[in-house]
Image (cartoon, rainbow, N blue to C red):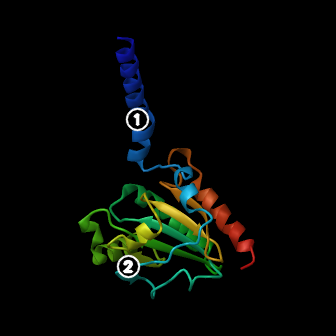
Amino acid sequence: MKMSALLLGLLVFGIFALLTFVLPTALSGDVPAALTAASSVGRAAPDFVGITDWIQTDPLSIAKLRGKVVIVHFWTNGCINCQHNYPHYREWAKEFAGKDVVIVGVHTPEFDWEADVKRIRDQAKSNNLTFPIAVDTDGETWRAWHNKYWPAIYVVDKKGNIRFDWSGELTSGGNKGNAIVRQKVNELLREAP
């Protein structure tokens, strides 16, 4: 009897924890950067692989971008959390224009209808997203980067190493992701190549 009560109590606690802490975070898209930091920060940035199309640029590679700070962000055009980050991407494009910073959007669709390249081009144009976009239709770059969330942002140093990452909206719920990313980029700009 005591064992049954203990097991029931543990089950109720587990369900409570899931509903209170895990599920709301997962549904909101606001996954703390700390959840992905251990798996990516400090390792060499993988290349852009399996890209089916490049928008607003000729094909890029991490090797071609050496000597520059690179902001890689994974997004898809049907994701509302991704759309909430668009103003920050536009700000970064203006703030870092003329500096050794390249923003690359990796568009990895979650649903088939998001994979349409014309739709991606139209969404980029209508939202004034002027940075290079790698169309990752089959998710090969997503998997190479061990990415798990939309949106996700990686900051790569001039030597091609991932130095910071962030998953989720940059400023939702009081997050200071936008300020932190900008600070990291400026720190990396000051480092020697």
Above or below residue 9? Residue 33 is below
Residue that numbered label 2 is attached to: 50
- The local crowd at label 2, few if under 14, some if 14 to 19, many if 20 or more residues have their Cα within 10 Å, is some
Q: Amino acid at mark 2?
A: Gly
Residue drawn at x 51%, y 70% as measured from the top left: 72
Label 2: element kind? loop
The spot of residue 55 in percent (x, y) is 40, 81
Q: Which mark is residue 72?
A: none
Asked if residue 98 is positioned above or below residue 32 in the image, the reply reads below
- Type of the residue with mark 1: Leu
36 vs 120: above or below: above
Residue named by callout 1: 18
Q: Quadrant of the C terminus?
A: bottom right
Residue in front for this viewpoint, 169 or 26: 26
Q: Position of residue 181 (x, y in %)?
A: 61, 61
Image location (x, y in percent) of residue 150: 42, 59
